[in-house]
Image: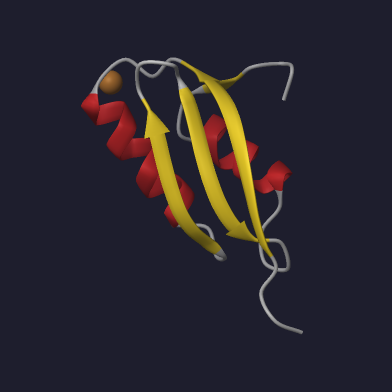
Amino acid sequence: MGAVSMIETIQVEGISCGHCVETLDKALKALGGVARVNVDLENKKVEVEFDENRASLQALRTAIVDAGFEVAEKN
Ligand SMILES: [Cu+2]
């Protein structure tokens, strides 16, 4: 089966500067199957494009929390 590309936007609390953006970017890209990460510092939103066969929204959320951030409840 080929890659199934998914795009999810996750609301993340605790992003305050460029270092946070970098940390998040690295943490998410360290997961297998993550193709693209776009952190919106101003709106505290993280857009992630990933292969549904290799990663999951739950895995993304866990990686964000493990990196020291908080995922908003509504996600
Ligand atoms: Cu920061």
* Residue projecting furthest to the bottom: 1
Q: Quadrant of the N terminus?
A: bottom right
Residue 59, image x and y in percent? 66, 47
- On screen, 25 above or below 5? above
Nearer the observer, 43 or 56: 43
Question: Percent x, y for residue 33?
Answer: 57, 65
Q: Is residue 8 left or right of residue 31?
A: right
What colour scheme was applied to this rendering of the protein?
A: secondary structure
Q: Quadrant of ligand 1?
A: top left
Residue at the spot 59% in from the left edge and 34% down from the top edge? 9
How many numbered circles are shown?
A: 0
| 58 shown above or below 46 | below
Front residue of this view, candidates 29 and 50: 50
Q: Quadrant of residue 19?
A: top left
Where in the figure is residue 36, as x and y percent of width and height?
45, 54
Q: Is residue 24 left or right of residue 53?
A: left
Q: Residue at x 38, y 19 (%)?
A: 15
Q: Is residue 33 above or below residue 41?
A: below
Residue at position x 71%, y 52% in the image: 56
Tell me what residue is drawn at x 35 percent, y 16 percent: 42
Q: Residue extending furthest left?
A: 18
The image quadrant where one finds the C terminus is: top right
